[in-house]
Image (cartoon, rainbow, N blue to C red):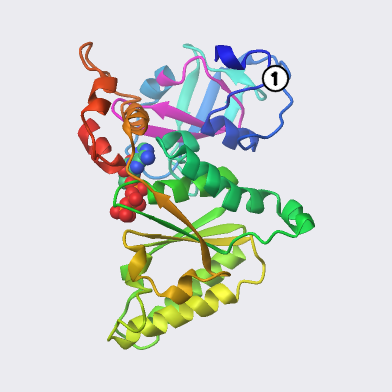
């Protein structure tokens, strides 16, 4: 961008940040490097998906510099994209994909995660993302700084807002940008009528998340498992709340495992869950304004061929009250 010239700033997208292991705001050293024309490139699709024609993919990534081990994204028609991992290149070292490059797509071993969600996949919500980065990303990436400053990073963060405003999306973006392991559970899924089963599942997932630390544990619809205890009649919910409280209190290694809870109705949550030391940070995820809607529409129409007379800006002006999920559906 013109206004960033001469300030020593570089813009990197989520894929490039992932490939270089850098985060937003990090200091980088940039040096020129010679890339040789690629003769052959072997790609492995990340995650499951239909097999793409190698020629088609080759056409999409023509002109891209690659290195074995990189992740590359091919933007398909529509708002879909398919990520690939570069398994091998010939010659080795940095290469440039050209029209003469032979691309081979191998069926993956299925271990690579599917498409990553980056911060630029979230429209609007700049203040919210900034706050979440300070609360979660920085403690996960620079634990020593927090230790030295004597600041205790939060154990739990509660996101609340209307359905489809992007709570799950933000949690995924944070996990990807911090390279933390991501565990996700759905509140209602945990509830099991058999005595002790629900608690065991909760303990199990906390245990797994601890083992793979740094991790982010995302509990969607947390209201289903942690309603106010005096209001519930069922014994199951009471026991799950108690177990969740015990697990949160038992997290010694602060900052290495962060629990993010999401809910549409924060007021029905058990107050004990919202006291300091548990879910002590709360972030409201609001309905996007016109600028936010424009950004979301831009994100979801990225790979779409639009007709000349379609004005995304005009659509953003007449969609008052639409949340991210509505706008995504509209684009489809
Ligand atoms: P729920 O409360 O129902 O779980 P949620 O707030 O978690 O909803 P998401 O699952 O994050 O909502 O959003 C649903 C979909 O809507 C996302 O997969 C994304 O494609 C789209 N979406 C929502 N908000 C945004 C946004 N701010 N920017 C871009 N896309 C968005």
Mark 1, other Cα within 10 Å: few <14 / some 14–19 / many ≥20? few
Q: Is residue 220 visible?
A: yes
Choose between 51 and 296: the one closer to the eye.
296
Residue 1: where, in percent of width, then height?
55, 15
- Residue 169 among those drawn in magenta: no
Residue 187: where, in percent of width, then height?
35, 68
Q: Which residues are magenta?
A: 60-87
Residue 262: where, in percent of width, then height?
40, 59
Residue 174: where, in percent of width, then height?
52, 47
Tell me which residue sits at (55%, 43%) in the image. Answer: 177
* The image quadrant in which ligand 1 is located: top left
The vertical placement of 102 against 289, above or below, is: above
Tell me which residue sits at (40%, 85%) in the image. Answer: 239
Residue linked to disc 1: 8
For residue 97, side relative to residue 189 (left or right): right
The vertical placement of 28 against 208, above or below, is: above
The vertical placement of 68 against 36, above or below, is: below
Instruction: Identify the image quadrant of residue 124.
Output: top left
Choose between 231 and 117: the one closer to the eye.
231
Tell me which residue sits at (36%, 21%) in the image. Answer: 56
Screen quadrant of the C terminus = top left
């Amino acid at each position: 961008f013109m206004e960033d010239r001469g300030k020593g700033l570089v813009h990197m997208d989520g894929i490039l940040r992932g490939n270089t292991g850098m985060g937003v705001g990090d200091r980088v050293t940039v040096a020129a490097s010679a890339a040789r024309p690629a003769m052959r490139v072997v790609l492995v699709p990340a995650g499951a998906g239909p097999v793409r024609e190698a020629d088609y993919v080759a056409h999409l990534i023509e002109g891209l510099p690659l290195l074995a081990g990189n992740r590359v994204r091919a933007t398909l028609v529509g708002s879909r994209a398919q990520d690939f991992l570069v398994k091998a290149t010939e010659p080795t070292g940095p290469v440039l994909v050209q029209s003469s490059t032979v691309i081979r797509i191998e069926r993956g071993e299925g271990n690579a995660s599917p498409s990553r969600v980056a911060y630029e996949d979230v429209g609007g919500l700049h203040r919210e993302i900034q706050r979440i980065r300070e609360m979660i990303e920085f403690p996960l990436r620079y634990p020593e700084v927090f230790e030295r400053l004597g600041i205790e990073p939060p154990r739990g963060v509660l996101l609340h807002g209307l359905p489809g405003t992007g709570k799950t999306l933000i949690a995924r973006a944070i996990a990807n940008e911090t390279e933390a392991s991501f565990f996700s559970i759905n509140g209602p899924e945990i509830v099991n009528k058999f005595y002790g089963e629900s608690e065991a599942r909760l303990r199990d997932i906390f245990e797994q998340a601890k083992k793979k630390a740094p991790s982010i544990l995302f509990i969607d619809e947390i209201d289903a498992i942690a309603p106010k205890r005096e209001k519930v009649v069922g014994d199951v919910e009471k026991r799950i709340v108690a177990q969740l409280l015990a697990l949160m209190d038992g997290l010694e290694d602060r900052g290495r495992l962060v629990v993010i809870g999401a809910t549409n109705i924060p007021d029905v949550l058990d107050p004990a869950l919202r006291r300091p030391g548990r879910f002590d940070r709360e972030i409201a995820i609001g309905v996007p304004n016109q600028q936010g809607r424009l950004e979301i529409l831009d994100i979801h129409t990225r790979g779409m061929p639009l007709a000349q007379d379609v004005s995304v800006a005009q659509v953003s002006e007449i969609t008052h009250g639409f949340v991210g999920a509505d706008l995504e559906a509209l684009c489809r």
